[in-house]
Image (cartoon, grey):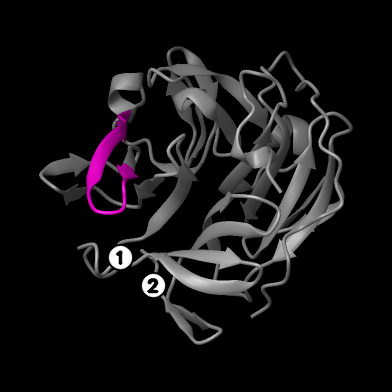
Amino acid sequence: MKLSSIAIGVVALALGASSGQAAVASLWYLTFDPIDAVVGTQSGPQSVISFDPSPGSTALVDTLTEAPVEIDAFERLDANRFYFSTDTHVESGGLVIAPGDIVLSDNDSLSLAFDANAEGLSAGTDVDAVAVDDNDDMLLSFDTAIELDGNVFEDADLVRFDGSSFHPFFDAATAGFADNADVDAATGFSGGRMAVSMRAGGTVQGTAYNHGSLLLIEGDGSFGAVVFSAIEQAGTSSDIASLSAEPLGDAIFSDRFEEG
C-alpha cells in the first residue's frame, strides 16, 4: 500500500463555480467511485485528486490504497496531515484498520485517531464520511442507522465526536432530505458550514442533486445550495466517495485549511 506525502504544488485561487453555483472552495479534494477520467486525470476510490474550479483542472494528490480497498472518508487537516477511512479491513504499516476506524496520517506516519471498537461501534459499521468542526472535533457519518450515547443517528446525519462522547450535529430530515438519503462524503468550513455529498440523487427544498453533487449546509443546519457538480464541472458521472476542501481565503471562510 502506498501512502506518500499529500503535499502538492497546486496554487489555490479564490474563484467561482460554473452554472451559477455558489463558490465556497478554492480547491476541492475528491475521490470517485468507480474509476473514471476526471477532466483528463484518471481517478478512482484509491486516489485523491484536487480540483481547481476556475480552470476546471485536476491533479493527482496521492494514491492511498491498493485495489480493492477503497478510501470512503477523507479530511485534509494541513499540507502534511489528513484523516482517512477505508471501506474494508486492511493492514498498513503495521496498523490494522477496520471500516469504522479513522486513521491519522501525519507526515506518512499512521495512527488510529478514532478506534471504532473502543468507541462502541458494532463490528462491520463503516464510517463513510469524516470532517472536522471549528473546535477540531470529528464529524462522522455512518453507513447505517446507529444508536450512540442514547441518540439514534440515521445514515444521512452527521455526528460530532468530542473525544469521549457523541452528539447530534446535522439532522438530514430536519434539513428537508428524504428518508432514504445517505451522506457518504463531507467536509467542514468555518461557522458550522459544511459541504456534503449523498450516495444517491434526490431533491432537497425543491433543488435536484445527484451522487456527484456537493451540497452546502449552512451553519444552522439548513440546505444552502449546490456548490459543485461532477457532471457539469468535472465531466464524470461517478459518485463522489470522499471529500475535503480548501475554502476561499476571505474573512468568512478563513480557517485551519490555510495552515501549513
Residue located 64% across and 68% down the image = 64
Residue 36 is situated, as x and y percent measured from the top left of the image, at 74, 55
Residue 113 is situated, as x and y percent measured from the top left of the image, at 42, 63
54 relative to 23 in the view: left or right: right
Which residue was labeled with disc 1? 116
Which structural element holds mark 2? loop
Q: Is residue 195 above or below residue 186?
A: above
Instruction: Magenta stretch: give its range.
Output: 160-171
Residue 177 is situated, as x and y percent measured from the top left of the image, at 36, 25
Residue located 64% across and 80% down the image = 1
Residue type beneath disc 2: Ala
**Residue 121's quadrant in the figure?**
bottom left
Which residue was labeled with disc 2? 98
Toward the viewer: 23 or 46?
Answer: 23
Residue type beneath disc 1: Ala
Question: Dot 2 surroundings within 10 Å: few (below 14), some, or many (20 or more)?
Answer: many
**Residue 259's quadrant in the figure?**
top right
**View extreme (bottom): residue:** 94
Residue located 66% across and 24% down the image = 24
Question: Dot 1 surroundings within 10 Å: few (below 14), some, or many (20 or more)?
Answer: many
